[in-house]
Image: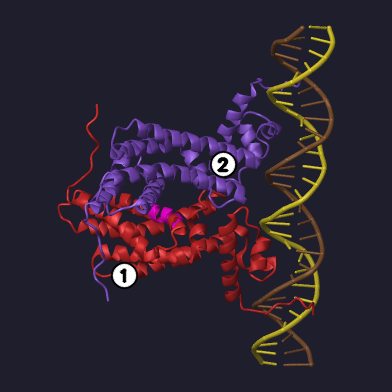
Chain colours: A red, B purple, C brown, D yellow
Amino acid sequence: MTAKQRQRLPRRVREQQIIDAAVQVFSKRGYHAAVVDEISELAGISKPMVYLYLGSKEGLFIACIRRESERLRSAFREAAEAGGDSPETRLWAGLRAFFAFVTEHRDSWVVLYRQASELGDVIAAEVVQARRSVTDEVVALVRAGIAEREDSRLGGKDAGFVGHVLVGAADSLTDWMERHPEEDADRVALRLMNIVWVGMRQVLDGETWAPPAGP
Amino acid sequence: MTAKQRQRLPRRVREQQIIDAAVQVFSKRGYHAAVVDEISELAGISKPMVYLYLGSKEGLFIACIRRESERLRSAFREAAEAGGDSPETRLWAGLRAFFAFVTEHRDSWVVLYRQASELGDVIAAEVVQARRSVTDEVVALVRAGIAEREDSRLGGKDAGFVGHVLVGAADSLTDWMERHPEEDADRVALRLMNIVWVGMRQVLDGETWAPPAGP
DNA sequence: AGGTAAGCCTACTCGCGAGTAAGAACGGAC
DNA sequence: GTCCGTTCTTACTCGCGAGTAGGCTTACCT
């Protein structure tokens, strides 16, 4: 016995521990700068175990994306579904859940969306897919909100537009929150609703903004 | 004569050519996956020239960030300054210039803001700095817009918030634009103004959004 | 107890890519 | 012509990190 044998654990558990560690390291270093040895060490395991269970560095990263993406999307959707009857309140509930999630799992967010241009098309596609799936959830709510108005002058394309505004703004606000720790997730979500949703409602009511007439 | 001597050009010119190539390759592959040989080849030069002029891969990347960041910021600022007297029209002009810039120089944008978590603190700091400098330009306009109202219920912190919303939304909308090529930069900027600026104006006017009273 | 499969490790290989040494060709200046 | 500085190249070194070979150990089953 080499004195160095660690506690044995079933594969299921180890896999999750490895992914836990990987999310931290990928988040901190980025995909390429991340070193598998560091991940395995943080997971309390040796490198070959990582390869045995996850296949390759790329496979490991994809596993991270999949798991974290699923968690985030579930958090959003479940909150939205429990958020009342109107799209408005559902969107609000979803946004609260979103900001709560990224507050608590900053690493997940970083791994999910701050790695876009990196590595071969395989992973890039995975990352794009993950972001799109979140955007789609938001767009669905916005579309429902628009559809409530019959005479609406906004259509499906506008829902996509607003969805991107919301997701992009939320992403960026993640940074803002770091410098304003006194603002919790709920307050940030409320602020965002106040700007974007109110703006959209105004546009729906026909009060648009137009640039001053030019030449 | 080794038949392989290329046209000789002064350092100034070569440096720019190298940076041109580097922006393309960094944008396509990401910092770590980018290979200096590919950059030098694309620049029509041999690798040692890159090291002679830019020092290291890191130095090369920083040169890219600096140059592209400066270009983008100038584009925004010059448009804003020429955009009339009110913060409103200046912001509008700035946004138009921004979207026009990223439409035409997508690579620059990708290199500037889609590389955050990568490499040592040195470059990460540079990237953060670049994004911040753009955000600051926007925030200044928003703050001016808010300050126009005397009885404003929004303050400096809100300007920062709205600035982050705008920059984040704009970032995300670059993806949306790729899937909607029929929308040019001006139309996207107009849409964004319609949502965000109108929303903010409403809040300034006191029409806020509040969640339905909860337990 | 003996077999066996799952969990785990040490100690490698080996290619890729950052960075460099050493000098060749060109273009003036005098 | 012949010097000198700049531009440019071929042809390396060398470390780092992804991935692996091969085997040891513990838990459980019969």
Q: Residues within 10 Å of mark 2 (few under 14, many from 20)?
A: many
Q: Specify the quadrant of the image occupied by residue D22.
A: bottom right
Residue A27, percent from left and from top? 55, 59
Q: Is residue D13 left or right of residue B160?
A: right
Q: Is residue B200 left or right of residue B114?
A: left
Q: Which residue, given by chain and number where applicable, does mark 2 sit on?
A: B26
**Quadrant position of the N terminus of chain B in the picture:** top right
Q: Whole-Å distance between the Cαs marked 2 and 1? A: 41 Å
Residue type highlighted by circle 1 = Glu
Q: Residue at x 67, y 69 (%)?
A: A49
User: Which region shows up in magenta?
Assistant: A168-175
Q: Residue at x 58, y 58 (%)?
A: A28
Near-viewer residue (A44 or B91)? B91
Q: Specify the quadrant of the image occupied by residue C26.
A: top right
Near-viewer residue (B85 or D22)? B85
Residue type highlighted by circle 2 = Phe
Q: Is residue A143 magenta?
A: no
Residue B83, percent from left and from top? 32, 32
Residue A128, percent from left and from top? 46, 53
Q: Chain of mark 2?
A: B
Q: Which residue, given by chain and number where applicable, does mark 1 sit on?
A: A81
SS label for mark 1: helix
Which residue is farthest front?
B150
SS label for mark 2: helix
Residue C11, percent from left and from top? 82, 64
Above or below B128: residue C6 = below
Q: Give the main secondary structure, helix, strand or loop, of the magenta stretch.
A: helix
Q: Residue at x 67, y 22 (%)?
A: B6
**Quadrant position of the C terminus of chain B in the picture:** bottom left
Residue B137 is tagged as: none
